[in-house]
Amino acid sequence: MSAILELADVTRIHGSGATEVRALRAVHFHAHAGELVAVMGPSGSGKSTLLTLAGGLDQPTHGAVRVEGVDLASLGYKGRARMRRTSIGYVFQDFNLIPALTAAENVALPRELDGARAGVARRAALQALEEVGIGELADRFPDEMSGGQQQRVAIARAVVGERRLILADEPTGALDTDTGEEILRLLRARCDAGAAGVLVTHEARHAAWADRVVFLRDGVVVDESGTDPAESLLESDAAR
Amino acid sequence: MSVRQALLALLEQGPMYGYQLRAEFERRTGSTWPLNVGQVYTTLARLERDGLVEGTGTDDEGHVIYRVTEAGEDEVAAWFTTPVSRSHPPRDELAIKLALAVTVPGVDVGAVIQGQRTATMAALQDYTRLKRTGRAALPGAATDPADLAWSLVLDSLVFAAEAEIRWLDHCEARLRRVAATRDDVRRPGEAPAAENATDKAARR
């Protein structure tokens, strides 16, 4: 089984000359199907850059970012946009739901943008909302929901349509402890069901839900705790 | 000495023998602080000597059953109403190790911090796994007081590990700040922003 997300020798430099900032330096990183990987590090360590690159929203200065085996750089702008709609789901700290759309409409949007018929997209959205435990809130607007419920909608939107890579940037940041834990439980369940998840957080207690925890410092991976899933061990054996 | 008070408190629920006491203790605390049965019987013997428990004969299988005395009940009540003493913090090997690492020449403090953080993070991952898959995660955990007790003990371990990681992050940030200030003093006129941490680490 190959990695859903792979960063191979990735360096990202912002600016040049005296103001040059090396946000990431020669980073190797991967997330397999069924695996939740947490990325920790202080502000400015490169966590967000890593997530932005993984999502195809920015491109590395050197190295390659591959999602389901496809080098994002080889896709071109349109191809990357399509990849973002069909393969990659995002969960943000501040939910980023569209206030004028209901929960179901928010979740259906990426499918509709991708050309799915409205009925098909709505059915997929309802199923995704059901899976995150808020099927009954499908016709509510974001401001009629609690923070935890809004984040559930955001997770449903991130996974609708068989997307297998979930990128979460401090998804529990705006939530109280219990609600935050519910969200992690949900992310964990999506990964256990076969998705690959990357969770950026500065809270050790939240990172502990992951299979592996990667520590970034000044754009470099300094440490890793936890273990690779059994499949990837087999894979590296086979590669030897 | 908490084993003593814990056993007395358990006997408030009703008379028990040594093995039962151990099982009841571990039902509430997981196997976080394993008690061997020898320790239980030694403690019971001391409690009996001090008049806090008394033997009430044996059951069919020859186990000596203990029950709490009136003086024992007073001791349990006093234990619950007195806060755990904070006047003498327990000896903390990690804090001592770091205090020495920053003062003894030739120790790579960064490596000490990083090594510990990885180990503590791994422990935190284990506790979290227990929380989400173990007894504490079962639906019954909300109703069985012993399961609730164990789940709270687990939370205590989680919070302690989290605090340790935060403290290690804090130590690392402060040490880096100190190192940066030293560099500024040593080489005035040079912009500290132009250098990076690898250079610093190499110079150290």
Image (tube, coloured by chain):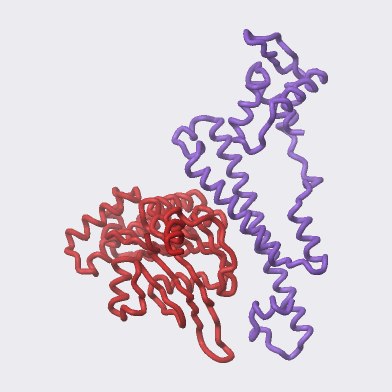
Residue A146 visible in rendering? no
Reply above or below: B50 against A168.
Answer: above
Question: In the displayed image of the protein, which residue is found farthest to the front?
Answer: A240
Residue B78 is left or right of residue A20, and the answer is right
Residue A8 is left or right of residue B106, and the answer is left
Image quadrant for the N terminus of chain A? bottom left
Residue B81 location (% of width, % of height): 72, 33
Find residue B99 and report its image quarter: bottom right
Residue B98 visible in rendering? yes
**How many numbered discs sit on the rendered protein?**
0
What's the residue at 40%, 51% (across, down)? A192
Residue A105 location (% of width, % of height): 26, 61
Colour of chain B in the rendered structure image: purple
Reply above or below: A68 against A225.
Answer: below
Residue B149 location (% of width, % of height): 58, 35
Residue A166 is left or right of residue A100, and the answer is right
